[in-house]
Image (cartoon, rainbow, N blue to C red):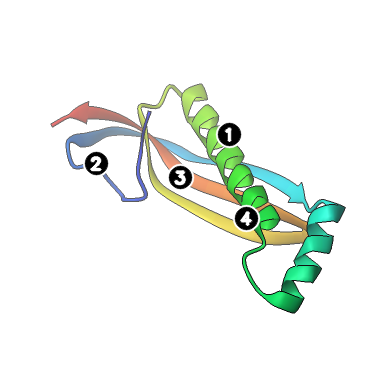
Amino acid sequence: MILTTQDNFADYKIAKTLGIIFGSTVRTRHLGTHFMAGVKELFGGEISGYTDLLVSAREEALERLIKSANNLNADGIVAIRFSTSSIASGASEILVTGTAVKIEKN
């Protein structure tokens, strides 16, 4: 599976557009992470617990996007975009969208 945030691939042409696809996950923060975030507010610095949480959430959402593309027998995904939104207090959604395509070598 070839992925890009661009609208096309340099070495391939899009032979067929299969449709818009997405992958998402909703995550909540751990109480211990939330406590450490409060401590970091006092002294400054990166909140590594939140960073790790968001990195794993992005990876999971991207895996789900790829699975959606595989279900359509796609060869690639173009126009990949990530977004984050707050669902409830302490819960966020990571959403990734793209367009599943069939491609051919130029």
- What residue would you read off at disc 2? 9
List x then y, in percent, for residue 21. 51, 39
Residue sitting at x 59%, y 41%: 61
Q: Identity of the amino acid at label 3?
A: Gly
Q: Disc 3 vs disc 4: which is toward the camera? A: 4
Q: Residues within 10 Å of mark 1 (few under 14, many from 20)?
A: some
What's the CA distance linking mark 1 and mark 4? 20 Å
- Chain-order first, disc 3 or disc 1: 1
| Secondary-structure class at tag 1 | helix
- Chain-order first, disc 3 or disc 4: 4
**Mark drawn on residue 51:** 4
Q: Is residue 28 left or right of residue 44?
A: right
| Marks 1 and 4 in Cβ contact (< 8 Å) | no
Residue 45 visible from this viewpoint: yes
Q: Identity of the amino acid at label 2?
A: Phe
What's the CA distance linking mark 3 and mark 1? 11 Å
List x then y, in percent, for residue 43. 71, 76
| Secondary-structure class at tag 4 | helix
- What residue would you read off at disc 1? 64
Residue 88 visible from this viewpoint: no
Q: Is residue 83 left or right of residue 15?
A: right
- What residue would you read off at disc 3? 98
What's the CA distance linking mark 2 and mark 1? 21 Å
Q: Identity of the amino acid at label 4?
A: Thr
- Chain-order first, disc 3 or disc 2: 2
Residue sitting at x 47%, y 30%: 69
Q: Identity of the amino acid at label 1?
A: Arg
| Marks 2 and 1 in Cβ contact (< 8 Å) | no
Q: Residues within 10 Å of mark 2 (few under 14, many from 20)?
A: some
- Chain-order first, disc 4 or disc 2: 2
